């Protein structure tokens, strides 16, 4: 299984080790940066302070104004992201819409890191066939939103500290904006399915939005930093980081985008969740997923757990993808 995982992981030959950057220019639009100017602090100290403030005021950090330009045409929802970046492509959110018969139930589907434009459409169609509408959302810097100079979604997760936080914040706000649109269409019972990076985004969004009632976390972990530091698929990102920060420092620098921080907030919102992870995962290593389950117990979450006998990449291969899809769709059908 590990050999299969490695062969699938390293089939991609276009990974780039990018230079380390504190990315302070990305912080300027954050509400906490307006409240706490740098005032002579060095970059690391300032980012650590912004993290503490973002966590303490996370409702504002992940807050937003609803977009005014939702547009659905030919099965594609588009709107302007409330988070503006220097990349025009990334500033337009794209959602592929799969409407179903039930006028009240809808599910947001979030793909994995570096997912191509049609990835997870099969899952969305499966959800649709069960009578629930599905909206497959493109993540920041992915597929239709990818800047022209990129071959991979490197700006979503990279050795640029501030940009990685900003991309995560943008993803959460885009998800919440999508919920606004779904509610305007009359949908009342809402679920979310996130895979890998999409799972992290889904947990952060659901922790800050009581409108999401049912959650599926397809791969799960605790700290954003630990996945990057220990994962097979992020070795090139770690290479850009490790001569500038150690794991403990990185954990604190990316604390405001880590699910761990928001378990208590999540637990207070009365949700039903499915956590799936892989026994031989080399990207979200099992130790991190098991720690997630311990926290789920600690905070009394209402959840179900499924552990599949495969790895991160092999989860997308036969027969595991069908087993995974069965667990996801049956959970949504029963609980939504």
Image (spheres, rainbow, N blue to C red):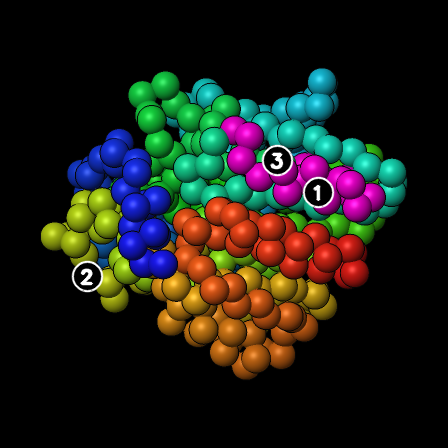
Of helix, strand and loop, which one carries label 1? helix
Instruction: Using a 10 Å C-alpha cutoff, classify the residue at mark 3 as few (fewer than 14 neighbours), some (14 to 19) or many (20 or more).
Output: some
Q: Residues within 10 Å of mark 2 (few under 14, many from 20)?
A: few
The mark lying in front, picked from 3 and 2, is 3
Secondary structure state at the residue bearing disc 2? loop
Tell me the SS state at disc 3: helix
Residue 302, position in %: x, y?
Answer: 67, 73
- Asked whether disc 3 touches disc 2, contact meaning CB atoms under 8 Å apart, the reply is no
- In this view, the residue in front, 316 or 56, is 316
Q: Which residues are magenta?
A: 117-135
Q: Position of residue 73 (x, y in %)?
A: 72, 18
Residue at 20% across, 39% down: 17
Q: Which residue is mark 3?
A: 121
Q: Give the Cα separation between the discs numbered 1 and 2.
A: 42 Å
Placement of 245 over or under 112, stated as above or below: below
Residue 258: image quadrant is bottom left
Image coordinates of residue 327 in percent, x first then y, are 65, 59
Q: Who's the residue at 80% across and 51% down the image?
A: 189
Which is nearer the eye, 148 or 177? 148
N-terminal of the pair, mark 1 or mark 2, is 1
Q: Answer left or right for 101 relative to 274.
A: right
Q: Dot 1: within a 10 Å radius of its alpha carbon, few (fewer than 14), some, or many (20 or more) residues? A: some
User: Where 268 sits versus 139, above or below?
Assistant: below
Tell me if residue 9 can be seen.
Answer: yes
Residue 183's image quarter?
top right
Q: Look at the image and say whether residue 262 sits in the magenta stretch.
A: no
Q: CA distance from mark 3 to mark 2?
A: 38 Å
Q: Which residue is mark 1?
A: 126
Residue 329 — which label?
none
Nearer the observer, 244 or 43: 244
Of badges 1 and 2, nearer the viewer stands: 1
Residue at 73%, 33% in the rendered image: 98
């Amino acid at each position: 299984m590990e050999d299969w995982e490695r062969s699938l992981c390293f089939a991609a030959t276009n990974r780039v080790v990018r230079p380390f950057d504190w990315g302070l220019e990305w912080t300027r639009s954050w509400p906490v940066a307006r409240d706490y100017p740098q005032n002579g602090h060095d970059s690391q100290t300032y980012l650590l302070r912004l993290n503490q403030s973002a966590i303490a005021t996370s409702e504002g950090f992940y807050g937003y104004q609803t977009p005014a330009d939702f547009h659905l045409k030919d099965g594609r929802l588009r709107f302007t992201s409330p988070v503006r970046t220097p990349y025009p492509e990334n500033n337009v959110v794209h959602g592929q819409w799969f409407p179903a018969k039930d006028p009240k139930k809808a599910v947001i589907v979030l793909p994995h890191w570096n997912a191509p434009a049609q990835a997870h459409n099969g899952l969305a169609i499966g959800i649709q066939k069960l009578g629930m509408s599905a909206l497959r959302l493109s993540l920041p810097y992915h597929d239709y939103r990818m800047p022209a100079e990129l071959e991979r979604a490197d700006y979503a997760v990279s050795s640029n500290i501030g940009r990685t936080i900003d991309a995560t914040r943008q993803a959460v706000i885009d998800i919440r904006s999508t919920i606004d649109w779904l509610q305007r269409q009359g949908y009342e019972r809402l679920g979310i399915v996130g895979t890998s990076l999409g799972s992290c985004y889904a947990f952060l969004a659901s922790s800050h939005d009581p409108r999401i009632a049912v959650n599926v976390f397809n791969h799960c972990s605790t700290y954003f930093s630990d996945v990057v530091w220990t994962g097979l698929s992020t070795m090139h990102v770690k290479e850009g980081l490790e001569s500038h920060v150690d794991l403990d420092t990185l954990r604190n620098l990316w604390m405001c985008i880590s699910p761990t921080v928001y378990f208590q907030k999540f637990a207070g919102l009365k949700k039903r969740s499915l956590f799936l992870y892989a026994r031989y995962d080399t990207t979200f290593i099992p130790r991190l997923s098991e720690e997630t389950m311990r926290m789920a117990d600690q905070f009394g979450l209402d959840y179900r757990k499924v552990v599949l006998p495969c790895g991160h990449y092999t989860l997308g291969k036969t027969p595991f993808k069908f087993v995974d899809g069965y667990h996801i769709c049956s959970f949504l059908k029963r609980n939504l």
